[in-house]
Image (cartoon, helix red, strand yellow):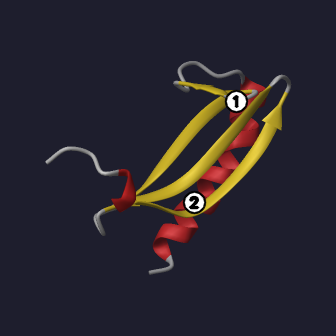
Amino acid sequence: MPYDASLDKTLWEEKVEVGEFAFEVKVMQYNEGVKKINIQRFRGEMFSKLGRITVEEAEAIVPLVQKAVEEIKKD
């Protein structure tokens, strides 16, 4: 079955800016399946794989990941 964007739901999201980048942490669910955490790095409108991150970036992202975990556990 090919990917269908209409079945992909964003259940929670929060962003944080670190230097020239913005990081977006989301709780996503595809086709009523398992809820998962998605992390993306943005520079303007362009996004890229997260890859390697600095300590400052990690310190900014970790609290958002913890919030995402709490959102998933609410159910």
Asked whether 8 or 53 is in front, the reply is 8
Q: Say how many tags the image has.
A: 2
Q: Is residue 50 above or below residue 12?
A: above
**Given the current orientation, which residue lies at the most extreme left position?**
1
* Residue type, label 1: Glu
Label number found at residue 68: 2
Q: Residue at the location (64% across, 22% down)? A: 53
Secondary element at tag 2: helix
Across and down, in percent, residue 63 comes to 70, 51
* Residue type, label 2: Ala
- Mark 1 is surrounded, within 10 Å at the Cα level, by few (under 14), some (14 to 19) or many (20 or more) other residues, namely few
Asked whether 55 or 31 is in front, the reply is 31
Identify residue for label 1: 45
> Given this view, does label 2 or label 1 mark the residue nearer the observer?
1
Residue 24: quarter of image: top right
Secondary element at tag 1: loop
Q: Is residue 5 above or below residue 52?
A: below
58 left or right of 52?
right
